[in-house]
Image: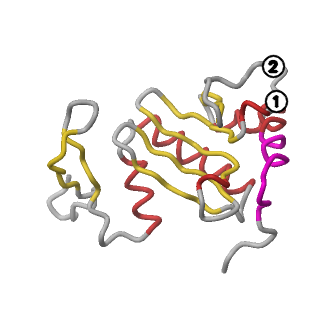
Amino acid sequence: MSANRPDTSPKRTRVDEPHKDGGLAMKLDSSKLKPEAELRSYIHTLDTKYQKLMRSVRAAIRKRFPTANELAYDYSSHVVIAYSSTDRAIDSLLAIDGRADGVRLYLMRGPELPDPKGLLLGSGRQTRFVQLEAASQLGHRDVKALISAAVDKLTVPLPSKGIL
């Protein structure tokens, strides 16, 4: 880091409680960050390769669903951004999950979705996921079909206009 440039990296503070993985939990001191800066700082915790992938997948999803609410969660081992028609995660359509081993696209109500190509992984009761290697996978016809099927399963439809 240059001596003339201020340190803009996220500030972290230790929490005195041990985390389930055996280490101490690290919390972001986000008291002074705006939501977009806070979300960027969450993504910044990922490996550089996955930071880039997470940002490009996020951009593609924002383009496809511009009125969806983005709900961000910073867990000790991964970062999740859910896209919802409301401010509640339970109403989410899908989520992207950045982890140490890559980026996943989670589809809500995954067990109910038609998946003739067997793309969906996982065994959760509410979700299934597609392991992403590139944002371009979102444009693959089989992935697009899964996303469209997930849209059809929404209990609260996405708003037709965003909040200004």
**Does the magenta run of residues contain 128?**
no
Task: Name the residue at 79% across, 35% down.
Answer: 146
* 78 relative to 159 in the view: left or right: left
Q: Is residue 96 above or below residue 66?
A: above
* 151 relative to 98 in the view: left or right: right
Q: Is residue 142 above or below residue 2?
A: above
Separation of residues labelled 2 and 1 (CA atoms) = 7 Å
**Does the magenta run of residues contain 148?**
yes
104, 111: nearer the viewer: 111
- Determine the image quadrant of residue 131: top right
For the residues bearing labels 2 and 1, Cβ distance under 8 angstroms: yes
Label 1 SS = helix
Task: Name the residue at 64% across, 32% down.
Answer: 125
The 10 Å Cα crowd at callout 2, few under 14, some 14 to 19, many 20 or more, is: few
Magenta segment? 147-158
Q: Which numbered disc covers residue 142?
A: 1
Q: Amino acid at mark 1?
A: Asp
Residue marked by disc 2: 117
Estimate the x, y position of residue 151 in percent, counting from the top left.
Answer: 80, 48
Q: Amino acid at mark 2?
A: Lys
What residue occupies the far bottom of the structure in this picture? 164
What residue occupies the far front of the structure in this picture? 125
135, 164: nearer the viewer: 164
Estimate the x, y position of residue 152 in percent, counting from the top left.
Answer: 85, 47
Task: Name the residue at 35% across, 69% down.
Answer: 33
